Each structure stands twice: as structure tokens, then as C-alpha cells.
Amino acid sequence: MSEKQVKVVFTPSGRRGSFPLNTPLLHAARVLGVDIDSVCGGRGLCGRCQIICTDGAFPKHEIISKSSHLSPVCATEIKYGERKVPLANGRRLSCHTLLLDDVVIDVPPESQVHRQIVRKDAEYRDIKLDPATRLYYVQVEEPDMHVPKGDVQRLMDALETEWQLSGLSFEVRLLKTLQPALREGQRGITVAVHRGSQIIALWAGFRDKAYGVAVDVGSTTVAAHLCDLFSGEVLANSSLMNPQIRFGEDLMSRVSYVMMHPEGAEQMTQVIRDALNSLFVDVAQIIGASIEDIVEISLVANPIMHHILLGIDPIELGGAPFALTTDAPVNVRATEVGLSINPGGRLYVLPCIAGHVGADTAGMILSEEPQAQDRMTLLVDVGTNAEIVLGNRQRLMSCSSPTGPAFEGAQISCGQRAATGAIERVRIDADTLEPRFKVIGCELWSDQEGFTDAVRDFGITGICGSGIIEVVAEMYLAGIVTVDGIVDGGLASRTARIISNDRTWSYSLFTSEGGEEPIVVTQNDIRQIQLAKAALYAGVKLLMDHMGVDKIERIRLAGAFGSHINVQHAMVLGLIPDCPLEEVSSAGNAAGTGARIALLNVNHGMLLRR
Ligand code: FES
């Protein structure tokens, strides 16, 4: 008599098949190629393999599905609930659930290995979770005098039998930790396997958590985002000022420092590595994890930051033809470049594109996917350097342009970084030439009741990057600045806000009650903005000319500046080319998002090619 077969259909994949009575669901899923996660290898420890039986009639499949068509909840599932969190209503561990009759089984997103991480911005495809490093728990067989082989070989055999992983390499460094771990875990250990080929870490017993950090090394700010490698969730963020600022505000002054000081490159390498290591400690502490729990770093940076971090002298990038040492992605053990995470943890640095178009631009492209657009799209990330990408699914071109620090509030007489007390919004009445403004840290406009009291604690301290764009654009709209950028001294007869400075004029935006340290916009400030604007616009225009287009259909502004800038004012100043206003939007921290995509999806290179 032939063995009774039962039917099972998995959703959402739609994979189906027939199996002998009492087949474990996880086994059926594996045979059918259904995407169900597991770290413990079906031992009821990890809880990753949870499924839900869908009750009801499914005429299309000729199935009446019922929860009672599965084996009753067993002791292992109850124990899992007691040890971790009780299984939610209707949930079962597929590794400990047997098929008794026909069923339709739903695999919820959190149980899928390659689940999608939903990106909040509706314009974008979600990130498919597929990290380079995965954890595998195995029970390694006991040593046997009659079977003379080493514990490494026993571990490899277990990985092959339980997980079909073969040909793995095993770092010598791990040899001394293997037997103590086997002893402590009573022969049960968890290994971290990198890119399906290399064991990079191991721990005694069962473990199902490992973290990665996405890092964005900017010339001014360095930011780290700690992610759960298996849920994709960002669990902690931390940032600090790039300590290399003391060697030079902008990139070229840092290269000059290296040219003039033989030990300069090494000093800068050391300070950025130290800064990153302190960020890793920070983000690990925020979630109560240890530095050893971090097994991956993915990093974006402009070419000079990229070279200095990797310990490469950036001198060649200081002059034409701006030769990169490498434009390939870098994938090394993090300790090789002095970064302290798990000793086997990996550092992945996204590829550079050209001399001054770096891994940060690659990150921006990964995040923004201009190559998936039909419309001619312009991406701009404005910092001390502006990274510019233009194109659509036919072709992409990119360049960078040295805008200098003016857009960040530096080299402006009353400029400052975006911080509490900085003027960030400005309006000027064209009739009276009187300004009103908003400062960071206060919701009120300066002409609203209660403003003076609201800002009393921190005071009005300067103008930040977005504020300087607005005030210059408003001065132009009000006729205070002429079309060629001259502050019109002829208006001094109309308002006391136009102040003479020998041969040029300034506009006074704010004077405190005591009259000390007024906040003014000088003729030189306007010149600085003109220079920065010209650099940015020249970059955009060159790309447009090379691309042979005279119209941009969509603009995405990345970075902190892009998030705060008022688009209309930017167009008034000619910072960005004309484009329908509703097609200009902020891209947030696109380079950082690109680092996160690379961290969570080992095949991100494919995304770039799509
Ligand atoms: Fe780990 Fe089922 S596979 S609990």
C-alpha cells in the first residue's frame, strides 16, 4: 500500500507539493525552495522559522486547510515560548510542526531570509535583505579515538551535513578558540560565515544576533548607523565632527597639509580611525551590545577620505589627472585597517567612480537609483564639495565640484554651522527692506509675539548655510543686491540697515538690544556665495552639455543641506537649474542610505546595474 501523501501550498511564494504524512513543514519548505529563515538548523532555538496555517477552503488548490491538519503544539515550541517570547496566536515553529493533512501555509515577512525592508520614501523600491555574513548553529559530533580527525574537520562536516555549506575556509586565528567554544557550548557552536565561503567568527552555543555598521565619512561629519543584519532595522545612530578638520577645513587643504608634512597622511589616518572606533563603541553601547557583536562595516567616503582611511597617501588626488589608487570596492578584515570590531569582522568600502567622485557618490546612486528613472534626473549632494549625478536609464554621468564651505556657513562673516541660535529662514519686505527671520531652536518668526523671550536662553548667534542662501536670495528679490551681486549703497537713504564699509556696503539683519555684534551680510559674503554657486552651477552645466540636454525633469537634493534648503530660493540664486518646483525634493542622507543598502544586500552591485 502506498504511503499517504498530503498537499501543502506556501504563500506568498505559491510553491506547492505533496509530502508523506508527518513530514516536518520546514523540510517541505526546503524541498520546494521556499524562503524560510533558520539559524538553529531546526532545533527549536531561533524562532526564525515561524509560519501561520491559513484556515479555509481553497478550491483552486482543491484544499480545505485547517490548523488541526498540523501536529499539535509540542514541548519544544512551548519551551521556546518560555525561553524567548511566546508564539503569537496561530504561529508555529515550522521545524517542529508535522504535516497531518492538506494545508495552506503563510510565511510571514519576518520569517523570510530575503525579506524586503520597506523604505519610507514611496518613490523607492524596498531593500532586499541579503547580508554578506550569516550565522549558522551546529552540533559538532563528539571526538572519537577510533575516528582520527580534528575538531575543525568535525565542524566542517557538521556544516556540510546540516547546512550544505562546503569548501569553507577557516581563519588560523580561530583555531585556538574552537575547542574552548566546543567545550563551553557542549559541542554546540554558532559560526559566522562571510559570503558563503569563509568562517570569520565563532561563539560557544546558540546565538542569533549579529550587527553591522553603515558609515558615512564626510569631510565635516562622520556618521555611523548600527543595523541588525537579519532584520535590517537601524538600532542606533551616532555622529561626530571629522577630527581631521584641525588639519584643514576642506579637502584640498588637507591634501596640502600632507604635501607639507611628511607624517601628515599617517596622522590623519590615525585620527579618523580613532574617531570611527569611538563611534563603534558608542553605537554598540546604545543597544547594550559588545564591539565583538559587530561583524560588518560598510563605508562610503569621498576619494580623499577614502584614501586616508585606508592608509593611502592622497597626494595624487591633489592635482590633475587626480589619479585614484583604486576605484574598485575594497573588502578586507576591518582590523587590517585598524578598525576595532569583531576580530574577524569585515570592512566593505564602496567603489570610487573617478578622481574626485567617490564612494559617497556610489552610495547616493545606490540609494537614489537614477539608472531606474525614465526622466532626466539630477542628484546633488552639497557639502564642502558638491557631488553631482545626471542621467536616466539610458546613461549616467557624474562629477564633483569644489563649492567650498560657504554653503555650510563657513567663510561667511556671520556664518556658522546649523545649530541652535543660527538664523535659518529669512524674508525681506521689498517695500520697507525690513527682514523677519527664524532661528534654529525656536518655532516663532522674529516678528511674532514671544520671539525675544523664546530665544533669550541661547541668543541669535549667526547664519547657517540654508539661512545664507535665503538671505542672499531675498536681498536680490528686494532689490538690495543687484543682478551682478553688488549691495546697492544707494538704498542707504531709505533704510539704516544698509551700512557703509569703506568702499562696499553691508545689510544688517539683526542687532541685539545692546547693539553689540550685529549680524550682517557683507559684500564679501555675497562674493563667497557667488563663487560657491558658480562652482556648483558649472558642474551641473558641464554635465548637461556633455549629456546634450538643456532641460532637467527631476532634481533630488541630498545631504543635510539638501534637506533644509528652500528650493525656490535656490532657484532664484541659480544654484540649481530650472525645473518644475514639484519635481524638486530632498533625498535625505542618500550616501548613508547607500552604505546601509550595501551592508544589508551583498548583491547591491546588481542593483547598480539594473
Ligand atoms: Fe530555528 Fe525552527 S529553525 S526554531
Image (tube, rainbow, N blue to C red):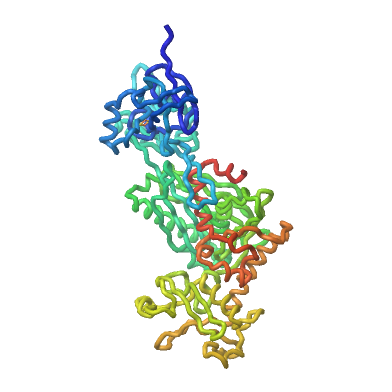
Quarter of the figure with the C terminus: top right
* Residue 324 horizontal/vertical position (percent): 62, 54
Quarter of the figure with the N terminus: top left
Residue under the image location 33 percent in, 24 percent down: 68
- Res. 241 image quadrant: bottom left
Residue under the image location 41 percent in, 13 percent down: 4
Q: Is residue 571 visible?
A: yes
554 left or right of 590? right
* Residue 82 horizontal/vertical position (percent): 25, 35
Q: Is residue 139 visible?
A: no
- Res. 65 image quadrant: top left
In-front residue for pair 156/195 = 195
Count the labels in the image.
0
In-front residue for pair 349/506 = 506
* Residue 560 horizontal/vertical position (percent): 50, 63
* Residue 388 horizontal/vertical position (percent): 62, 59
Residue under the image location 58 percent in, 44 percent down: 607
The residue lying furthest to the bottom in this view is: 493
Where ligand 1 lies, by image quadrant? top left
Looking at the image, residue 127 lies above or below residue 378: above
Looking at the image, residue 405 lies above or below residue 64: below
